Amino acid sequence: MRHASQSVLSIVAGTVFTVFLATPASAQPVYNANDLTFDEFQVLPDDAVIEFDGHRFTKHDVLVAAAKAKEHHADRIAKEKADFEAAIGKLRHKQEEDLEKDNARIAAQLAKVRAAGQSGRAHALAEIREEYEELVERARHAGQQELEEIDEEALKLLVRLRTLDR
């Protein structure tokens, strides 16, 4: 038999607790935990002695250990949730930074393309102007058939000029 001051190690909800029995085991009947239903456990007095895996506990000790295990579990869940939220925040921040970098890179490339397009447009305009001046010079000395060919070429130049404005 165990005395009131003797400690007993118990596993309740996965946590090890040191339990002190409040009353001598000889004064009360001992209930086998494996034989008790939940309802039978509920109606036992707080000082009822329950035996589990060769260790004896009072119902009160079991309830206190279960409450501590529940509190420990709730604390662990709260910490894991906080860690998860922090990781999500860190990931979102990194994604925002990456997006900003990508947007800056794309804006720089777009500016280069636009600049190249403007210089390419200027070059194309210069070519069209040069071809136009050649056509004007040819038209001064051209006959009727050559003037018709010059008109066709001038229309082609006009089409090219309009495509540049789009």
Image (cartoon, grey):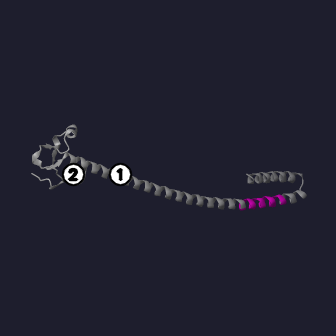
Q: Which residue is mark 2?
A: 11
Which numbered tag is attached to residue 47? none
The image shows residue 49 at horizontal and vertical percentages of: 15, 45
Assign a secondary structure to mark 2. Answer: strand
- Mark 1, residues whose alpha carbon is within 10 Å: few (<14), some, or many (≥20)? few
Q: Residues within 10 Å of mark 2 (few under 14, many from 20)?
A: some
Q: In the image, what residue occupies the spot 23% across and 54% down? A: 16
Magenta part of the chain: 119-133
Residue 128, x across and y down, in percent? 79, 58
Task: Determine the CA span between mark 2 and mark 1.
Answer: 20 Å
Tell which of 60 and 74 is nearer to you. 60
Going by the numbered disc 2, the residue's amino acid type is Ile
Relative to 139, 78 lies left or right? left
Kind of residue at badge 1: Ile
> Which of the two residues, 50 or 128, is positioned nearer the viewer here?
50
Q: Position of residue 67 (x, y in %)?
A: 28, 48
Queried whether the magenta region covers residue 132, the answer comes back as yes
On screen, residue 80 versus residue 136, left or right, reads left
In the rendered view, tell whether residue 123 sits above or below residue 21.
below
In this view, the residue in front, 3 or 51, is: 3
